[in-house]
Image (cartoon, rainbow, N blue to C red):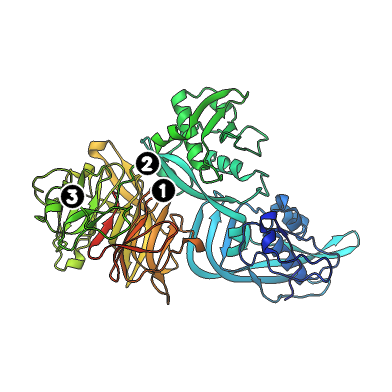
Amino acid sequence: MPRLPVVFGCCALLLTGCASIPDSGDVEPVKASPRGDSQVRVYPVAPAAGADPNEIVDGFLEAMTSDDPDFAVARKYLTKQASQSWQPADRTTVLAAAPDPADPQGPSGPDGPGLTYLLYGEQIAAVDAGHAYQPVAPEPYDRAIHLVQEKVLDGKEWRIDDLPQGLVLGESDFQRNYRAVNKYYFASGQSWLVADPVYIRQRIDPLTRMDPVTQAVKVLLDGPTDWMRPVVDSPFPTGTELKRGTRTLEFDDRNSLKVPLNAKVDNVGREQCRKMAAQLLFTLRDLTSTRGEQVELLRQDGSSLCVLSGDQAEEFAADRTSGSPYFIDAKGRLAQLSASSKEPIDPPRVRGPFGDGTMPLGQVAVARDEKYAAGVSQDGKSMYVGSIISAGEVGDARVVSKAEKKEDRLSAPSWDGNGDLWIADRDPRQPRLLRLADGADAPREVAVDGLGDARIEALRVSADGVRVALLLAEDGRTTLQIGRVERRGPADEQTVSVTELKAVAPRMETVTAVSWAGPSRLVVVGKEAGGVQQVSYIQTDGSTSAAGVLPGLNQVTGIAASDDEQQPLVADSDDAGIVRLPTGANWQTMVQEGSSPVYPG
C-alpha cells in the first residue's frame, strides 16, 4: 500500500547530519521517524481532493505522529461527527512499529455502507489519560478504522467515521514525541519526596499548547498517578492550577523560575509553600540543560508566596547518603570497596563480627546510616543484625528458615528509608515476606496481594519506603515486578502490605538480579527470550530506551547501584570478580574474589 508523503523538519543542530537538501525532483514517500530522533519534526499533509480510501487511512496515521495544534490536520481525515468525538488525549497505544493497515473490507461503491481497514501491529505499552506508562508483554494489536463517503460542496469525499480512541503510535514515533519526567509527591505522613514517573510531549503539547516545563508543572498539579495515589500526599491545596492562560514557563539567567498559580494557594503558610516549591524543583530538575537553582511561587495577583533554592530543597530528598559499596570477601567477611580506586586493592573489612570472620556471611545488606548490617549465614538458614562500626557479639538470629535446601532458604535482606529491614523466606512449605521495624523488632509477615503461586526470590526496597522491587519465580521463569508498600495504623501497631503488583520488564524471559539506581530507575540483569544476558536500566514504569543497555558483562550474578548517580555500578561476575562501571568507561575489576556487592540500602 503506498504511503502519503510526509514532511520532516531538520533543525539547525542536525544540519551536519543532512548531507544535502534537494531543491528539485519528485517528492518521495517515507515512513514517519524511522530512527525515533527527538529533533525530527513531522508536518502533516491534509487530504487531497478526491483522495482514495488508502490515502485517507495512511494520511491519518501519519498525521497522528505530528505536533499539529489540536491535531487539526488529522481531524481533516475524519467526518465532522468523528472529529468531535475523537479524543487524542484519552490514551496512547504504543506498538513495536507503526500500525499496518490491511486491505479494506466491505463494499466500495459510491452508495455502499463504507469500508473497514483493520490495523495490525504488536502492542508493547499504553499511556493512559493521566500520562502513566504501562508496558505489556508483546501482544497482537488489531483495531478497525471505518470509512464512509461524506458529502462536501463538490460532491463526496472518503472520510473516517469510526476509529479507536486516543493515539496509536509506533515505538519510534512515541520516543520522538514524548519524554519521561518524574513528578514528585511526599510519602504519606513523611517529609521526603517520592518520584512518580509520567510521559509528557517533547515539544509543545498539541492540545494544551504548553511547553515542556509548563506541561510538567501541570501534570504535577493534576495529582499523582492512580498507582501511586494511595501512598503519597501533595501539600498543594485541592483545585490548585496554573494561572489561567499560562502556557510558557522559562528559567531566567539566574536559573530561577516564577510559577503563577490560581487563588487556591493565596493563603498557604510558609512551610506548606516550601514543600510545594520542593515538589516543583525536584520535578523540573531533569527538564533543563542547567539545574534549576530556585523556584518562586506566585499568588493569583502576582505577589510572591515563597521562594525555595535547590540546596534548600535537598532536605526533602528520600536518600541523601552516597556511601561506598560493600561486598563479602572470599572468607565470608564484610568489607568496603573504594569506588574511586583505579587498581584492585585489598579492601578494608568492617569492624565487628561481620568483618572479623566470626560470623561468615553468604548475603548482606548495609543500613542506610552505615552503622549496622544484616547478614545471612552462608548456609542461608539464619539472618543476624550487628554493628559494623564497633566490636561486639552479633547475638541471636533474628530470622531462621526451616527449609531443607539452601536455595529455598533466606533471600538477601534490604533496608528501606524508614530504617525497616526486609527479607524473604523462600521455604516452599511456608514462603513469607518479612519486615523488622527499625531493623530490631520481631519479624512480622507482610501480605503480598496478587502473589498467587509465585515465590519471592529476591527483593529491593526503595529509599522512600513506598515501593519494593520483587523477583518472582513461577513456572520456570523469574520475572521483575514492583509492588506498592501500604502502611496503616500507628507506628507501634502498624500493618504493612504490598499491593497492586505490576510487571516492569514483561519482555524479559528471566531476570537474575535487580537494584535501585535512582528515584524511579532500576538496573536489571536478565535476558529476553532467545537472547543473551544483558545489564540494562529500566524505569520503574517499565519504559526503556536503547541508551539503557550497558556494556556487556558475562555471568553476572549480582548488581548494585546507588541513588547517587555519581557512584559507579558494581557487579559480581563469575568471570571477572567484583567489577565496577565508571561513567564513560568499561567494566573494571576491583576485587578478584568476592560476592554480594551492595550499596547501603
Q: Residues within 10 Å of mark 3 (few under 14, many from 20)?
A: many
Q: Nearer the viewer, residue 555 or 428?
A: 555
* Residue tagged 3: 350
> Tag 2: residue type?
Ala
Q: Looking at the image, can residue 545 be seen? A: no
- Front one among 310 and 79: 310
User: Is residue 577 visible from the viewing direction of this image?
Assistant: yes
Distance between the alpha carbons at the discs numbered 3 and 2? 26 Å
What is the crowding at mark 2: few (fewer than 14 residues within 10 Å), some, or many (at least 20)? many
As shown in the figure, which amino acid type bears the numbered disc 3? Val
Instruction: Name the spot of residue 516 as percent of width and height, x first.
Output: 36, 53
Query: What is the spatial separation of the Cα atoms under label 3 and label 1, in whole angstroms?
Result: 28 Å
The disc, 3 or 1, on the residue closer to the chain's N-terminal end is: 3
For mark 1, what is the residue?
Answer: 519
Kind of residue at badge 1: Pro
Q: Pick whichever of labels 3 and 2 is earlier in the sequence.
A: 2
> Element at badge 1?
loop
User: Looking at the image, is mark 2 or mark 1 earlier in the sequence?
Assistant: 2
Q: Name the residue under label 2.
A: 318
